[in-house]
Image (tube, helix red, strand yellow):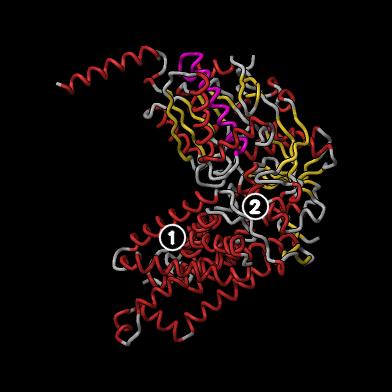
Amino acid sequence: MFATRKLTAAVALAFVAGAAQAQVSDGVVKIGVLNDMSSLYADIAGPGSVIAARMALEDFMKTSKSKLKVEIISADHQNKPDVGSSIARQWYDVDKVDMIADVPTSSVALAISQVTKDKGKAFVASGPATSDLTGKACSPNTVHWTYDTWMLANGTGSAIVKTGGKSWFFLTSDYAFGHALERDTEAVVLKNGGKVLGKVRHPLNAQDFSSFLLQAQASKAQVIGLANAGGDTINSIKQAAEFGIVKGGQSLAGMLVFISDIHGLGLNTAQGLIFTETFYWDLNDQTRAWTKRFVAQSNGKYPTMVQAGVYSGVLHYLKAVEAGKTDDGTKVVAQMKKMPTDDPLFGKGSIRADGRKMHNAYLVEVKKPNESKGPYDYYKVRATIPADQAFRPEKDGGCSLVK
Amino acid sequence: MTEIFGIPTAALFGQLLIGLINGSFYALLSLGLAVIFGLLNIINFTHGAQYMLGAFCAYLLLTKAGLGYWWALLIAPIVVGVFGMLIERTMLKQLYKLDHLYGLLLTFGLGLIIEGVFRNEFGSSGQPYPIPQLLTGGHNLGFMFLPTYRGWVIVASLIVCLGTWFIIEKTKLGAYLRAATENPQLVQAFGVNVPRMITLTYGFGVALAAFAGVMAGPIYQVSPQMGSNLIIVVFAVVVIGGMGSIMGSIVTGFALGIAEGLTKVFYPEASNTVIFIIMALVLIVKPAGLFGTQK
């Protein structure tokens, strides 16, 4: 008898809850953080992105007093598009996931963006780099959050060409990301009067770069542009030092460098590198306070811009679900574009029709070992690039959503 | 300047030398695998993790105990070797009578666990390890700039590889070892403690991996996944050389390093698949591998 009564109560409760959240499918907003948990990009995104997503949920609940039920899950896509898209399909079809966040590795992100569009869900991409996500492959269900190859090329590339680095040789990671970064950087170099002497494409996760570096050395280019990321960038820079490339007068341009890479290299090897980021933990009081909370949960690792982007993206997504009273992917993304963004890490910003999130970028230089005062005190901010100059003009991307 | 297939010969020499350096690592690692497989019949998939442990051991010795590269080269193989013997005594020993597959599964699982623990502790970007003072700098060979440390890698690896080959193929101890794998009962009847010999052999194979790990530290990042990146290639080397053949693994290790180096010049995109293409071709023509004998 008791059991039946309990059951009736539960059913009644479910109806009440259902009425309160009429538009939220199955009563729960489910967010899946999908990234590289175990290989060369795991420090850039990995478990740190899951921490960031949880912090976003915590802060959203605290400030909004929302009644939404939100669940966060995560998985490892192993940097393989096929693995990534099959997880995404299972999440959307079976596990009732409403939004996928992060997804570093451009090739995987392009696949996820397509799956998300087919299923009418939402994709907040913090990890991937390729500017095609808001260009020819743009989607009404995808927001590209943190950075992209056009922004990196424009920020870092033009700064280097303007200080005299006119001839370039590219070391390019052989997949969608590397190709996009090389293409966008080459365009910037040529536009500023420089020239490209050659390029070599290496497999993802290549370990040994000596062979490629020798080819770069032989090219006699002034600048060796590293169109790769994570462990590949670290090993390229480290081995370039070993082969006396910088001593020989050539300079290295890390087109995509994260703070975790600098930490892995050590300031001795990394000092003087110039590159572009959209987040640095030591920018202002708000970023420092947030970082303190993050570090307490991350085994002492400081946040990368990708992890910061996951926080900011998930926060804005939840605000949009609350405001639009729906978790229908297409509608939420439209709502996200309608609302201005505001969070402690990236400040005030907006999302364009093509899905590009707009915020400032920073040209940073790595400090010398004697300039660094504490843990992760690695950057000097050389210039702030305002959002409208940092990212590709909307009309140039070729996105079909831009009228 | 003379050219071969459009590549200047000077550049080609440089690439050959680089190939030889990478081949040194393949040879060192595949040698350990060959020793373990040849004498224990265990397919040691923990080898990559043990190589990584060697590098981390060196890193920890440097940062926690202040002991430099040369000490690490001595201590790390011993520490990791003892750890290996512990695994052999407590776990692998139970599996000798079973199918190869069980040993493979156990060692593969162990490798994943060790790697996971280190990734959790140290992250995936890895830790820097400096080149020892004595071996910094480099020489201009005319056709390329050879970092001193890379030269040392070739020399050290050749000494260790040939030394191992000599012990196993040419000494009395080696004869015991080989006899023990052929017929353990008979060797035991002569008063040789076979189980202990097997434990020591496994420890030695593992120590070789750790040695290679210390050698790799200054070149690559000391990172948890450094072993898993290499292990598949090394297994291909062992298969091409002939499972269990000592000389086979040494020669194939160096030769494939060169083949890979040349691919990086002519068609870099294929540089991580070329070894498997060679493996497929060799297996079609000689299923037991280049130096293996059909049992």
- Residue that label 1 marks: B45
Badges 2 and 1, same chain:
no
User: Would you say A161 lies left or right of A289 here?
Assistant: right
Q: Is residue A198 visible?
A: no
Q: Is residue A175 above or below residue B196?
A: above
Q: Is residue A361 above or below residue A332?
A: below
Q: CA distance from mark 2 to mark 1?
A: 25 Å
- Disc on res. A235: 2
User: Would you say A175 lies left or right of A392 here?
Assistant: left
The chief SS type of the magenta part is helix
Q: Amino acid at mark 1?
A: Phe
* Along the viewing direction, whichever of A268 and B162 lies nearer the viewer: A268
Residue B192: image location, x then y, percent: 35, 84
Q: Residue at x 45, y 86 (%)?
A: B172
| The residue stretch that appears in magenta | A303-329
Q: Residue at x 33, y 83 (%)?
A: B187
Disc 2 crowd, CA 10 A, few/some/many (<14, 14-19, 20+): many
Q: Are marks 2 and 1 in contact (CB under 8 Å)?
A: no
Q: Amino acid at mark 2?
A: Asn
Mark 1, chain letter? Answer: B
Residue A235: image location, x then y, percent: 64, 52
Q: Is residue B135 above or below residue A368?
A: below
Q: Is residue A318 magenta?
A: yes
Q: Residue at x 48, y 59 (%)?
A: B49
Q: Is residue B120 magenta?
A: no
User: Would you say A18 lies left or right of A312 here?
Assistant: left
Is the N terminus of chain A in the top left, top right, bottom left or bottom right quadrant? top left
User: Would you say A236 lies left or right of A76 here?
Assistant: right
